Image (spheres, helix red, strand yellow):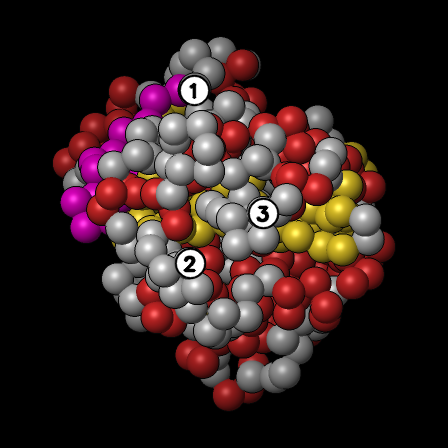
């Protein structure tokens, strides 16, 4: 994690944002592009300094899969309509937290995982007693199509509508009382995330802090994630109708007494990842999933792209998605681990954002895509899959060689 402000590199989030916490502080975090990451990183920082910290939400937040540091508590209710998400515990509980904890960190906005957002009329939901409101913005949006990277881009005022995101649009959105400052309580700050050692984003952050300073807004920037912090969701696509095979090939025994899908489940299960998701149309396959999150695909005729999109939605705020098909029964855990490590190493260098398994110069599944391609993945249709993205972003592609041809062989093409 790297943090900077106009004074240079800073050692803590509180220092970077120039925040001196009062007794029983309440901090509401709004915006997009790293709210949850900021909240949990800040909670760890505060807990390690001896503070008792509560994390909660006034809207919704993803369930945290990793163990919490001592001194940190999550207070929220399960959302019955959105598995894997938490919802506000209610006003009475929120107010009580203020008295019971040294610091209360509130996720007060939603953004569907996109780098920027324009608030709906009812957003953000910031309690009046907040001491600080921190708006997060993801600079991965810089230079990209507004429709692809701004949640509710269609709702932007006419004066802000344009084709691509630039510095002028960023500062106008963040400084606006209708945008970044909407419903802000207490002192207002901006954190620009996802700089990630990118020279254009760094220049943008430096320029942004100068412009925001003219409006009296203090800001900081940096990257909240190291390679070790990356959340990579593994998404298994098991919804195909097996028309060429003639029966449900996922339940076919390739020769050792186990259904083919079980081989892939067993290869994925040992991976050190926060989320394993199985997308299927078959109850029999879902019954084999065990500890995987199961998403039922009720429209398999929409093609493999629909399964990918269901998996992406279930993955929430994942930083990357590893897509595996379930008709490669000889794929090994070791190869999947090499792919994950290769992705992390490239992330450290700021280079490849797509990793594909390959054999003798030809690409195969699985593939890993950075979440920066989320909008493009969500726009795919039919049986296109990820090949369209690997062709369009060849400069961001790294291939990892399979150990043998068997690993890349599906049941339609036995060795």
Residue 16, quarter of the rendered image: top right
Q: Mark 1 highlights which residue?
A: 68
Residue 122 seen from this side: yes
Q: Dot 2, crowdedness within 10 Å: few (<14), some or many (≥20)?
A: few
User: Is the residue 125 above or below the residue 105 in the image?
Assistant: below
Q: CA distance from mark 3 to mark 2?
A: 12 Å
Look at 54% across and 14% down and name the residue there: 49
Query: Please, what secondary structure does the residue beneath circle 2 have?
Result: loop
Q: Dot 1, crowdedness within 10 Å: few (<14), some or many (≥20)?
A: few
Residue 306 seen from this side: no
Residue 331, quarter of the rendered image: top right
Instruction: Give residue 86's position: percent from left, percent from top.
Output: 28, 40
Magenta region includes residue 75: yes
User: Is the residue 111 above or below the residue 292 in the image?
Assistant: below
| Mark 2 or mark 1, earlier in chain | 1
User: Could you tell whether 134 is left or right of 414 in the image?
Assistant: left
Instruction: Give residue 143's position: percent from left, percent from top.
Output: 71, 70
Look at 54% across and 27% down and name the residue there: 271
Instruction: Give residue 133's position: percent from left, percent from top.
Output: 45, 47
Q: Mark 3 highlights which residue?
A: 414
Tag 3–tag 2 contact (CB < 8 Å): no
User: Could you tell whether 251 is left or right of 338 in the image?
Assistant: left
Residue bounds of the magenta highlight? 72-86
Look at 43% across and 20% down and name the residue there: 68
Q: Nearer the viewer, residue 344 or 217?
A: 344
Q: Nearer the viewer, residue 366 or 185?
A: 366
Q: Dot 3, crowdedness within 10 Å: few (<14), some or many (≥20)?
A: few
Instruction: Give residue 286's position: percent from left, percent from top.
Output: 28, 42
């Amino acid at each position: 994690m790297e943090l900077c402000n106009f004074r240079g590199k800073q050692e803590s989030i509180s220092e970077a944002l120039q925040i001196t916490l009062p007794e029983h502080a309440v901090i509401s975090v709004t915006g997009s592009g790293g709210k949850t990451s900021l909240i949990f990183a800040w909670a760890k920082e505060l807990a390690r300094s001896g503070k008792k910290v509560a994390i909660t939400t006034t809207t919704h937040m993803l369930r945290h899969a990793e163990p919490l540091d001592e001194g940190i508590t999550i207070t929220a209710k399960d959302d019955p309509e959105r598995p894997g998400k938490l919802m506000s515990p209610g006003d009475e509980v929120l107010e009580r937290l203020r008295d019971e904890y040294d610091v209360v960190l509130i996720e007060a906005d939603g953004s569907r995982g996109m780098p920027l957002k324009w608030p709906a009329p009812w957003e953000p939901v910031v309690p009046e007693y907040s001491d600080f409101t921190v708006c997060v913005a993801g600079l991965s949006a810089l230079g990209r199509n507004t429709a692809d990277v701004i949640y509710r881009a269609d709702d932007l005022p006419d004066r802000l509508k344009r084709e691509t995101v630039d510095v002028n649009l960023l500062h106008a959105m963040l400084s606006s009382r209708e945008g970044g400052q909407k419903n802000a309580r207490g002192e207002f700050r901006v954190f620009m995330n996802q700089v990630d050692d990118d020279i254009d984003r760094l220049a943008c952050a430096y320029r942004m802090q100068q412009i925001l300073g003219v409006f009296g807004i203090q800001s900081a920037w940096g990257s909240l994630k190291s390679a070790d912090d990356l959340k990579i969701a593994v998404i298994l696509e098991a919804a195909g109708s097996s028309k060429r095979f003639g029966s449900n090939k996922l339940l076919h025994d390739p020769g050792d007494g186990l259904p083919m899908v079980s081989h892939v489940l067993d290869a994925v299960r040992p991976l050190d990842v926060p989320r394993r998701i199985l997308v299927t149309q078959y109850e029999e396959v879902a019954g084999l999933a065990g500890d995987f999150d199961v998403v039922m695909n009720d429209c398999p005729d929409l093609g493999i792209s629909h399964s990918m999109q269901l998996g992406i939605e279930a993955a929430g705020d994942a930083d990357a998605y590893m897509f595996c098909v379930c008709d490669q029964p000889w794929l090994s855990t070791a190869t999947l681990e090499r792919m994950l490590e290769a992705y992390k190493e490239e992330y450290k260098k700021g280079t490849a954002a797509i990793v594909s398994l390959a054999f003798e110069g030809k690409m195969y599944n699985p593939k890993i895509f950075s979440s920066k391609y989320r909008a493009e993945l969500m726009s795919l249709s039919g049986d296109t899959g990820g090949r369209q993205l690997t062709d369009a972003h060849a400069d961001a592609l790294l291939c990892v060689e399979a150990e043998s041809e068997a690993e890349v062989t599906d049941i339609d093409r036995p060795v």
